[in-house]
């Protein structure tokens, strides 16, 4: 997995995004072949979940994902290269991104108060469920069913191989509706900046899907309060707008560290 969730939770800064044509038939066919062979490495039910969302073959043909995340004082525009996992966030007063080597932050007025290393691709991973759970370096185990409001959801416990990402001890729980096979819940622990694993499971509900260029992606996701490790009632909802998913890449210069930006250091 290329820089997975460093876990958890802005109008373009005048950057003109020129698209680069990438119409290579051979490359697209190779992506389909890779998806077909990779499907054999996933649990059968998880493969059905991917298929219920449009399938890994369609997902792996996509190159660029872009969405707007409304915030209290600004909108954040998130842009991700799905092959390289380079990314960029543009807000009114700041921008940040990953250029393939370093996380950078451009914040001339010191308006950003978070940790860019933690945040720069966080919402991408929450948004691109369940497809990011097909990345490399993941181990799957059947989980105990999750019962909520009379419904029993089946699922998997997901762990990462040692050395994968900045928080390899994080754990995730994907639960799906056995009737539709679509993802319904994500449970996760947070170990970023901490020593050792955690048993404090947070919960996000995925029950607002929309069809975008052949695959189902969330229109919104909802964080839930929890008790004894299980979700109880909704705490807050995050809405995604202006979603664009396409097979063409951004110009490579788009993700480069801009003049005046600084390399971000893990806090």
Image: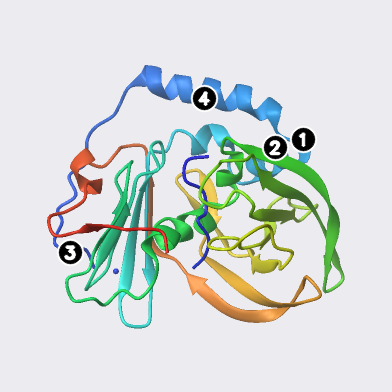
Could you tell me if the residues under marks 2 and 4 are in contact, i.e. CB atoms within 8 Å? no
**What residue sits right under mark 3 in the picture?**
13
Q: Position of residue 202 (x, y in %)?
A: 67, 68
Give the answer, above or below, for where 161 lies relative to 217: above
**What residue sits right under mark 4 in the picture?**
32
From the viewer's perspective, tell me whether residue 16 is left or right of residue 111: left
Give the answer, above or below, for where 205 lies relative to 46: below
Could you tell me if the residues under marks 2 and 1 are in contact, i.e. CB atoms within 8 Å? yes
Could you tell me if the residues under marks 1 and 4 are in contact, i.e. CB atoms within 8 Å? no
Question: Toward which corner of the image does residue 150 lie, by quadrant?
Answer: bottom right
* Earlier-in-chain disc, 4 versus 3: 3
* Earlier-in-chain disc, 2 versus 3: 3
Identified at 47% across, 40% down, the residue is 2
Mark 4 residue element = helix
Identified at 18% across, 76% down, the residue is 109
* Earlier-in-chain disc, 2 versus 4: 4
Indicate which label's residue lies in the foreground, 1 or 3: 3
For the residue carrying disc 2, how many other residues have a C-alpha within 10 Å: few (<14), some (14-19), or many (20+)? some
Mark 1 residue element = helix
For the residue carrying disc 3, how many other residues have a C-alpha within 10 Å: few (<14), some (14-19), or many (20+)? some
Judging depth in this view, the residue of 207 and 3 nearest the camera is 3
Identified at 68% across, 54% down, the residue is 171
**What residue sits right under mark 1 in the picture?**
44
Give the answer, above or below, for where 218 lies relative to 42: below
Judging depth in this view, the residue of 168 and 25 nearest the camera is 168
Q: Position of residue 224 (x, y in %)?
A: 66, 75
Q: Position of residue 252 (x, y in %)?
A: 22, 39
Residue 255: numbered disc: none
**Mark 2 to mark 4: distance in Å?**
15 Å
Mark 3 residue element = loop
* Earlier-in-chain disc, 1 versus 4: 4
**What residue sits right under mark 2 in the picture?**
47
């Amino acid at each position: 997995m290329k820089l997975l969730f460093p876990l958890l939770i802005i109008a373009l800064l005048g950057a003109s995004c020129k698209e680069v044509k990438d119409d290579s038939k051979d490359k697209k066919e190779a992506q389909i072949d890779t998806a077909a062979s990779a499907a054999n490495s996933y649990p059968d039910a998880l493969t059905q979940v991917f298929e219920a969302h449009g399938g890994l073959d369609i997902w792996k043909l996509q190159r660029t994902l872009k969405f707007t995340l409304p915030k209290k004082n600004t909108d954040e525009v998130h842009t991700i290269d799905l092959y390289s996992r380079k990314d960029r966030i543009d807000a009114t007063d700041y921008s940040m991104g990953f250029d393939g080597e370093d996380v950078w932050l451009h914040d001339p007025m010191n308006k950003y108060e978070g940790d860019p290393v933690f945040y720069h691709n966080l919402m991408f991973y929450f948004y691109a469920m369940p497809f990011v759970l097909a990345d490399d370096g993941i181990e799957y185990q059947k989980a105990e069913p999750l019962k909520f409001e009379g419904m029993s959801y089946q699922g998997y416990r997901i762990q990462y191989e040692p050395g994968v990402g900045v928080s390899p001890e994080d754990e995730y729980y994907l639960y799906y509706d056995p009737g539709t096979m679509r993802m319904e819940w994500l449970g996760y622990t947070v170990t970023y900046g901490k020593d050792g694993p955690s048993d404090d499971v947070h919960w996000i509900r995925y029950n607002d899907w929309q069809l975008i260029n052949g695959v189902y992606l969330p229109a919104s996701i909802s964080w839930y309060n929890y008790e004894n490790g299980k979700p109880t009632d909704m705490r807050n909802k995050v809405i995604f707008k202006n979603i664009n998913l396409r097979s063409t890449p951004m110009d490579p210069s788009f993700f480069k560290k801009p003049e005046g930006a600084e390399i971000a250091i893990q806090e």
